[in-house]
Image (cartoon, helix red, strand yellow):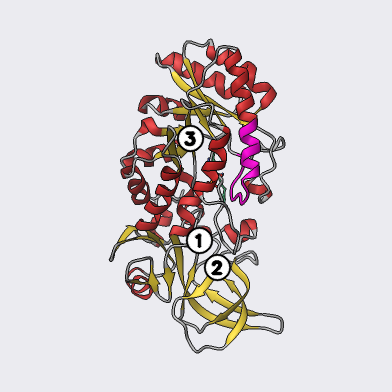
Amino acid sequence: MDHFNYSQNRLFAENVSCTDIAEQYGTPCFVYSRATIERHFLAFTDAMKSHPHLICYAVKANSNIAVLNVLAKMGSGFDIVSGGELSRVVKAGGDPSKVVFSGVGKTVEEIKLGLDLGIKCFNVESEAELHRIADVAAAEGKVAPISIRVNPNVDAGTHPYISTGLKENKFGIELEQALPLFEWAHCQPSLSVQGVDCHIGSQLTEISPFLDALDALIALIDRLADKGIELSHLDLGGGLGVPYNGEAPPHPSEYAAALMKKLERFPQLTIIFEPGRAIMANAGIMLTKVEYLKQNAEKNFCIVDAAMNDLIRPALYSAWQRIEPVVKTSAESKVYDVVGPICETGDFIGKERELNVAAGDLLAVRSAGAYGFTMSSNYNSRPRAAEIMVDGDKTHLIRQRETVESLWSGEQVID
Ligand SMILES: Cc1ncc(COP(=O)(O)O)c(C=O)c1O
Ligand SMILES: N[C@@H](CCCC[NH3+])C(=O)O
């Protein structure tokens, strides 16, 4: 999805200044645009409007309650992977009956919570989990809605850490094993078979792997129909990529049109998508201040006040995110490694970036709305950054910067 409207200290379509935000809330901080989140969500619903559908935003991408609330108000469903995410959705006013629950390690407590709240579906990832859900539901006197997540063995062509649809990955159930499990589940009084799902990976920039996965799911749906098992939904997961650095992933309308062509003969089937990054990545930036410039015989370093604990994607996946000075200065242009204060060489936000910067300048790290704050940590006892939502010409603090004291709350010394 495209970037929000950001240029030269002005954020979004609104006339809000990054320097004002940095002064008011401090740095590093994450800044999101409500208008962009809404526009990105609508790109999916508009693309699917002629077919029954549910967009289940993947909460892991950005789970701030204010973000979830904006999406809940637009009628979004949610894809969750933990009881914690389910509680956030409820707190944010999300509708549990539009929640699908993915993940390979659901605990008994999480299954109970999902049943109590009446979620739409458990996306089951193993035979053992299917049995556990059947047992828990029977013990609770409930019927658990389930879908089986299949692993279609499709190469998503993305970073190996975020590819999830290959046989060697821990996710889903092999196609050959899925059919007997569906048949078993169909006969269990405590289970209600609702759908089939898959999620083959994240940051996909081509449509063809999605189409290959869909072919596999459609073949399975046909085989199930032959056995008298009719499904009410097909969930193709998330994974649609965004342009970080010139990539040109398909727009949701292109993506949906290509998929829907294959689904013409299933007019009754509800299609579920679970986009996370496509909605949030380019609806946010991270603001960080230059603390020092440093030079040695080999390199120029631009030392900023954000670090790998705030944005781990560069360290973890060698991810590239655009870094630009918020205000153009007359500082000399040099090639810098943009690094944080953490005691690891892997602590960088960007490498070999040509920048005109001086100490004290403000930098914007783009595409930071997804998998930014949610993957942050307190490593090196660094308080986690504030989050801010821009809405029209207003800015709202939607999560305070952590205090140092909050970092040790819950810890205690022993005699
Ligand atoms: C099951 C599932 N659904 C949805 C997503 C969201 O993926 P993305 O943010 O790439 O759309 C993920 C993460 O990759 C996932 O594991
Ligand atoms: N956290 C990853 C994406 C993983 C998606 C989770 N299934 C990223 O930042 O790119």
* Ligand 1 found in image quarter: top right
Q: Secondary structure at mark 3?
A: strand
Q: Residue at x 55, y 70 (%)?
A: 341
Q: Residue at x 38, y 38 (%)?
A: 87
Residue type of the residue flagged with mark 2 = Arg
Measured as percent of width and height from the top left, residue 296 is found at 67, 83
| Residue 367 disc label | 1
Q: Given this view, does label 2 or label 3 mark the residue nearer the observer?
A: 3
| Residue 272 disc label | 3
Q: Secondary structure at mark 2?
A: loop
**Circle 3 crowding by C-alpha within 10 Å: few under 14, some 14–19, many from 20:** many
The answer to whether residue 171 of the structure is visible from this angle is no
The residue indicated by pointer 2 is: 322
Measured as percent of width and height from the top left, residue 155 is found at 70, 42
Q: Is residue 30 left or right of residue 184?
A: left
Q: Earlier in the sequence, mark 2 or mark 1?
A: 2
**Circle 1 crowding by C-alpha within 10 Å: few under 14, some 14–19, many from 20:** many
Above or below residue 89? Residue 392 is below
User: Distance of mark 1 from mark 3, alpha carbons?
Assistant: 25 Å
Q: Which residues are magenta?
A: 200-215
Q: Earlier in the sequence, mark 2 or mark 3?
A: 3
Residue type of the residue flagged with mark 3 = Ile
Q: Residue at x 61, y 52 (%)?
A: 205
Q: Secondary structure at mark 1?
A: loop
Measured as percent of width and height from the top left, residue 150 is found at 62, 29
User: Distance of mark 2 from mark 1, alpha carbons?
Assistant: 7 Å
The answer to whether residue 66 of the structure is visible from this angle is yes
